[in-house]
Every structure is written in structure tokens, then in C-alpha cells.
Image (cartoon, rainbow, N blue to C red):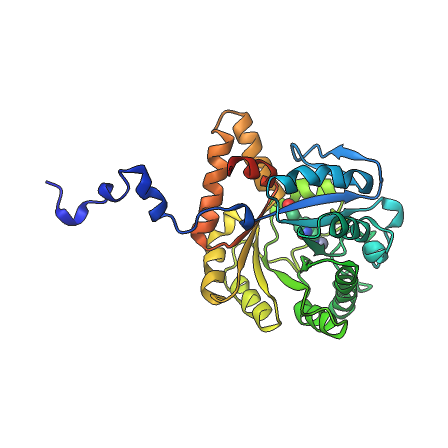
Amino acid sequence: MVEIDSLLHAGYHNPAQRPWQIERTLTKGALMYPIFITDEPDSLIPIPSMPNQYRIGINRLEAFIAPLVGKGLRAVMLFGVPNDSVKDEFGTAADDPSGPVILAIKLLKSRFPELLVSCDVCLCEYTSHGHCGHLNSDYTIDNTASVKRLAEVAVNYARAGADNVAPSDMMDGRMRAIKQGLLEAGLSHRVSLMAYSAKYASALYGPFRDAACSGAKFGDRSAYQLPPGSRGLGRRAIERDVREGADIIMIKPAMFYLDIVRDAKEIAPNHPIAAYQVSGEYAMLHHSAAAGVFDLKTAVLESMASLQRAGCNLILTYFTPELLEWLD
Ligand code: PBG
Ligand code: ZN
């Protein structure tokens, strides 16, 4: 016999009751769309490792974004994809005033003033060695020089009109340096800082590195991105970035790190929590659906539900265009 304290079905038998059981309902406002801006102005090139994603030239950007804004897109994150010829040891091209990111910020803010423009801040797309910071002669990271340069780049994106800057480099102490830089530039009231706080050294960035041509030429990123099995470092990074002035705490990747998302919610209960469903997660869901493992829409919506259940307020996902349709 089923005991009276065992009865759960009644609470969700009627479909009208199911939303009452859900932690948060997914809305378009919870999404941020990461896009790649190439320095070939007229190009719109499909990215082979990421179905339906493109490297977008500045002259193609308005037409690419307009229909999405029409469907309710509220926020994008920009990644620059420069040609190899501009890369150097220091990532000088990151804040080139005529480079793809700064041109894209200006264009988007003039055509779509309501669209929040966030910029990933990192050097790996712009360095000849492909690492996220400056290197010492023994190829270890020069943290001090890296932080100084990253703060400069972030402030220059903010000066160009970016609404949010999001450093993904994982150098120590960059949040404070960037926040300080924004304050000194008189921009701290209108530019927010999203910390890629717990960013793990993940296999799931593979397609992105293809898309952004940002793979390291030697070594890997394990000396600055977090070891996948570590919970303590993730928690300490979150605590640190809260102390250093981050406005939003992000966890990356998303689906393999839901415990860390939940940790972030607990450690930073008064901050918005974001998760980045990265390129490998995107490709995995796409390829699985294509192989008949599951229905794409059902699985993607379930992945969103998992992130919200874990505590996310904001989700960065390449599925944003599909979700804008599905959420209608
Ligand atoms: C650059 C950066 C990466 C991603 C976001 N910013 C790649 C990396 O750290 O190697 C990954 C995004 C994705 O995989 O979708 N530091
Ligand atoms: Zn990087």
C-alpha cells in the first residue's frame, strides 16, 4: 500500500501545475548570444565545427543581428577573429580601434541601442603563441603584465561603448584591475563586469578554438584554467572575484559543472549567476540529435532547465537563435 506521505503525483498531474514546480521559467531576457566577428568585412563564413554558427564580417553584422533583435534578443557577447598576420607576442590587436571588436561595438550600439553588448576580454585570439596572457622567457605566465594589458583592453572596449566586459583569461587579480580601470575612466557606473570566475581547463572548448583560431601553439592552459576535478579552486575563485568587484559571476563550461553553478549561487547569493554553455556542449547536443539520440529542442530545453535549476540567472548559449523561436 502506498502511504499518504509517499504521494507526489497529484502535485503535477494537471499540466497547469507543472510551472509551479519549476525553479525559474526560461525567458528571452535570460539569454546572451556569443558571436564571432571576423576582420574580413564582407564575409559570412559558416564555422565547420559549430553547425549554424558564423564568422561575421562587420558589413554583414547589422543584417545578421536585426532579425534576432526583432525576435527578442537582449544581449550578445563579442569575440574577435583577427587574421594571423596581426597577431604578436603581446596581443596588441585586441583593442585595435579599427579591429573587429571595436567596430562591432560601435555598429551594434548605434543601430541597436537597447541591445546589451558584452565583450569577452582575452588575449588568446590576438597572441602569436595563442596563450591568454603575456609570457615570461620560460613560457610561464607573466601575471602582472597580463593583468595590466587585459585591464587596458577592457577599458578600451568600454570606451568604445560596450555595456559589459567579461575577462575569460583566468589571470590572478584581473577583476580588481579592470574595475579600477573602469572607475578611473569614469565608466564604472555604466559598464558591468562579468567574471569568468570558475573557468575550467575543459575539452569542451575545442570547436571554439577552431572558430576563433585561438588554440595555444605550445603547452596548454592548465596552469591558469582550473583543474576539472577541483571544487575548492572553483569556490575560491568565485569568492575572490566577488571581493574584487565582479557584478556577475560566471561558471564555464555549464553542463559538466552544475555543482559549481550551485556553489556559486550559495557563495554569491546576491549576485546574478551566469553559465556558459560552451562550443563543445553545443556541438555535442547538435551531433547527438543528428545521430538520433534525442530530439534537439527537447534536449536543449532540458539543458536550460538544468542550468536554471542549478541557480543560473543568465545563460550564454549558441542556441539563442533557436530558443528565441521556441520561447514564442
Ligand atoms: C578565450 C575563450 C575561450 C572560450 C571563451 N573565451 C576559449 C579558451 O579559453 O580556450 C570558450 C568558449 C566556447 O568554447 O564556446 N579565453
Ligand atoms: Zn583566452
Splitting the image into 4 quarters, where does residue 166 fall? Answer: bottom right
User: Residue 67: horizontal and vertical position, in percent?
Assistant: 67, 37
Q: Nearer the viewer, residue 154 or 62?
A: 62
In the image, what residue occupies the spot 80% across and 64% down?
136
User: Residue 101: horizontal and vertical position, in percent?
Assistant: 78, 51
Splitting the image into 4 quarters, where does residue 19 fall? Answer: top left
Splitting the image into 4 quarters, where does residue 320 fall? Answer: top right
User: Residue 47: horizontal and vertical position, in percent?
Assistant: 71, 34
Looking at the rendered image, the quarter that the N terminus falls into is top left
Report if residue 133 is visible in the image: yes
Report if residue 220 is visible in the image: no
Is the residue 219 above or below the residue 208 in the image? below
Quadrant field for ligand 2: bottom right
Is the residue 150 above or below the residue 277 in the image? below
User: Residue 141: horizontal and vertical position, in percent?
Assistant: 74, 63
- Residue that sits furthest to the right in the current view: 85
Is the residue 91 above or below the residue 320 in the image? below
Q: Nearer the viewer, residue 254 or 328?
A: 328
In the image, what residue occupies the spot 54% across and 45% down?
28
Q: Nearer the viewer, residue 100 or 150?
A: 100
Q: Indicate left or right for 171 with 149 as reference.
A: left
Q: Indicate left or right for 23 with 123 as reference.
A: left
- Count up the numbered dots: 0
In the image, what residue occupies the spot 74% across and 52% down?
109
